[in-house]
Amino acid sequence: MSKQLDFDVLIVGAGLAGASLAASLRGSALSVGVVEGAVPRLAAEWDARIYAISPASKAFLSEIGAWEHLDHARIGPVYDMRIFGDRDGRLDFSSYDCGLETLAWIVEASRIQMELWETIKRQHRLTLLCPARPTGLSFDEQRATLTLEDGRTVSARLVVGADGANSWVRRQAGIAERFSPYGEKGVVANFQCELEHDGCAMQWFLPEGILAWLPLPDRRLSMVWSAPDALADELVAMSPEALCERVARAGGERLGALSLLTPAAAFPLRLMRVERPVGHRLALIGDAAHAIHPLSGHGINLGFQDARALAARLADLPTWRDPGETSILDSYARARAEETLLMQYTTDGLNRLFRPTHPFVARIRNLGLNLTNAMPVIRNMLVRYAVSGHF
């Protein structure tokens, strides 16, 4: 006979968003279940999957006890950022000018993932169901019921879908999404630099896509090149030597010669919007709720702030309150609507603006960068919104 498990909150997906939500509920009276298909693993060397962690997300990771346990010798602080248009446009950001410790921290994905995993493994009132894969999801007035591949059934008053952009939970719940492919892939790789980067991130809006160099410790950098599909496939297929020369040349050889630390990999880029991030006894967080272009580096920060906002509405509930109440879920949806919408439209608009087009449009967009660069108040307001979610 299959065993029935019951929880207050059931999180499907223990990626960064799902695991951080679970960790943020540790002081609550709620019983929490987490369903995950596989135990995470550390990358063998330097992880080519990196994230730019904003000060707001760093504060959240500190609150849940994860940030301090990361290996800080492998974290690259970003003190400055330089953005170059496809002509003479330029925009500079400085943490010093904005009164901030740093603009962001560059952290390997697997390092954060493992730390969050170890955190929730030790958590009271939390049950990890791993490896476990869901095969069915149903809802009634009082609870949601998840059927697992091994025959077990799990019920909860609230189900949280944290299972990525192709969310199984979202589909089972009947929440419609709209994907808009960019015809691009994000090409990622890590390099050793000949010259010091001094904690400066650089980004180029090029005719062949958007290239970002993100600082890692000890003259290393992580590259994210949002390139048209054909170029992305070409980059991934290059020899290490040819790739290093191509990437260095695209960045004007600002950090001298490059040598490859991790092989290049690519993933398709697309914008994804959902009609609503909540439903009956259901909430979506992270990539299950939204997907944006990576040019701003804000994808995971949106996910962390989703987890933070939902946890804030659940953690201190009195025992008589139902975590799946419509009013609670609506409050979460309202809290996340502005930032998510702004980042989706901003990143999508910038990507489209800097695609190859008429020379007159090129002059206008580069002029816009230069005008913004000439107005420190506006420039600093943009930085503050990017790092804190408000001006």
Image (spheres, helix red, strand yellow):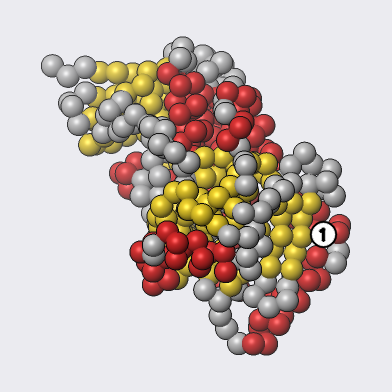
Residue 82 % position (x, y): 71, 60
Give the left or right position of residue 94, taking residue 35 as reference.
Answer: right
Which residue is found at the position 44% from the left and 38% from the top?
45
Query: Which residue sits at x=36%, y=49%?
Result: 166
Which x, y percent locates residue 81? 71, 55
Q: Is residue 256 left or right of residue 229?
A: right
In the image, 40 versus 314, the foreground residue is: 40
Q: Quadrant of the N terminus?
A: top left
Residue at the image point whose x is 62% and y is 41% from the top:
217
Residue 40 seen anywhere in this rendered image of the structure = yes
239 lies left or right of 343: left
* Residue ID for mark 1: 378
Residue lying at the far left in this picture: please name it: 1
Question: Label 1 amino acid?
Answer: Ile
State the residue at coordinates (58%, 47%): 220
Specify the quadrant of the image occupied by residue 147: top left
